[in-house]
Image (cartoon, coloured by chain):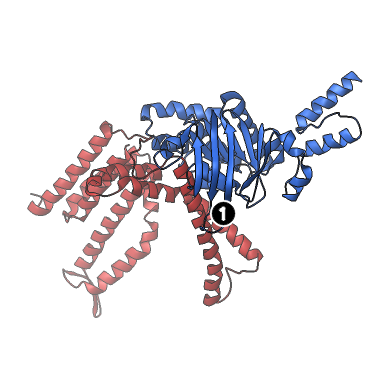
Amino acid sequence: MDPRAKIMIMLFLMIAIFIPAGIWGYVLIGLFILIALKLSKLSLSFALRSIKPMIFMMAFLLLINIFVIKTGTPWIQWGWFSVYSDAIYQTLYIVVRLMMMIIITTILTATTKPLDLTLGIEKLLHPFEKIGLPAHIIAMMISIALRFIPTLIEETQRIMNAQASRGVDLENGSMKEKVMAILALIVPLFVSAFDRADQLANAMEARGYDPQKPRTRYKVLKMTGIDYAGMLLSFLILVSCIYISVRGIS
Amino acid sequence: MDAVKVDHCSFSYDGETDIIRDASFSIPKGSYTTIIGHNGSGKSTIAKLLIGLLEARTGEITILGQKLDETTVYDIRSHVGIVFQNPDNQFIGSTVADDIAFGLENHCVPQEEMQARIEEAAQKVGMLDFLETEPTKLSGGQKQRVAIAGILAMSPDIIIFDESTSMLDPQGKKSINDQIKKLHDEKNITVISITHDMEEVAQSQNVIVLQEGNVKMSGTPMEIFKHEEELKKMQLDIPFALKFSNALQKEGVFDHGICTLEGVVDELCRLKQTN
């Protein structure tokens, strides 16, 4: 699928999730997510795994809500302490929203290469170039940043080894000692990163790069039927969510 | 016509001490020229001047008959490519194909043409099977080959190698050196190579020796290597093959010096057959 379409679908669904359309809105979005999972050949367990880190936060949310929200019908009475129905509903509400948002972004990042995403963002921001937003420069910055992440990780490892062999201990010691040790890592890393940036700029310029000049692109994006169908469907979901929240379901 | 003509050029980074001092030389079209000199002699600065990354304080640089200045620098860069020292810091794209495409994109080559040109260039350097590979999965030598492909895709007239093999292992060094020689022999590209590697100097046609920003000597490798003592003073050496052949000459086996290993082997075989 075209990354532009994916980003747009994500945007529509995100807005739809934030519209208080009650249970039916979430059913619609949930169905769409299930179809998307099926089409992208990702398993449901993969999507659920991405939620795992959130469980602690959700439990915390439940606890707070139980103590704070005291409306609705009391469900459990336990001495002076009682749990009200609204507390549970509120928590479920937020949890479902969060889960859906995480699953949507997981699907997007799991099925799209970072470079394609960058290209998609660039193309989507293209109309804003007229009002002075440098979309292609932003895209170039993102793609170079992504390109250099592994290189800089490698460099960090190398500097860590080099400093360790000179007696810098990054793992043991008091907080203050650790901070000082990290300084011995950060400073050379920055020096080398600036050096790299300088050489990279030279290499780019030598190959005729000028941010002010028009360039052609090697990778082209092409929307197909499924892209339009997906965008239309997610847009319809958004519209119906708005409708439900304004008019009610009947 | 000269591919490169440098006429009384001076350059300094800080405005006080000149790194390049009134240097003049020319490099004929289609030649294979190496530039040598010890550290700080201004070799890399010369390379940056030739591609217009730096601007000379005085003097004039002419590339393929075109005077290098602000108005011509972009046009000149489509004819001149440069391969730098560090393979990591000149890999711009996220995959091999993207990196080769970078120069084409900059010079507004139509998208329909790109695929064919990328494949052709990748094939010339033997990287056709790696088009979708990410740079982290490539060796230093492979990255340098990609850098060469990125320049070849532009079909340049001149390629400058700025110590392109100095960060590579011996195997990578040999593969790049062979590649450079092949480019020069088959494509008739003017090759300018800045190097420390005396074996590479031996395979070139012309040598320019820089000392403190000035041209100290120039000529064919054999002419330069005759000044062994002076080279040693500049912390430069002569190739092992030439030392070997000089020793044989002293013993009366050879009647002339030979500076490449292949040449020495051929000569020995010839002598063995005649005796």
User: Can the viewer see residue B139 in this picture?
Assistant: no
Above or below A173: residue A152: above
Q: Hue of chain B?
A: blue
Chain that bears disc 1: B
| Mark 1 surroundings within 10 Å by alpha-carbon count, few (fewer than 14), some (14 through 19), many (20 or more) | some
Q: Is residue B206 visible?
A: yes
| Nearer the observer, B177 or A21 | B177
A214, above or below B122, in the image? below
Quadrant in which residue B224 is drawn: top right
Question: Residue at 39% of width from left, 59% of height from top?
Answer: A53
- The tint of chain A in the picture is red
Residue A133 pos. (x, y %): 27, 50
Q: Is residue A190 left or right of residue A234?
A: right
Q: Residue at x 58, y 60 (%)?
A: A159
Give the residue pinned by disc 1: B18
Identified at 30% across, 67% down, the residue is A61
Up/down of A68 relative to A106, above or below: below
Q: A229 or B153: which is nearer to us?
A: B153
Q: Nearer the viewer, residue B55 or B39?
A: B55
Decide which of B7, A25 is in the foreground and name it.
B7
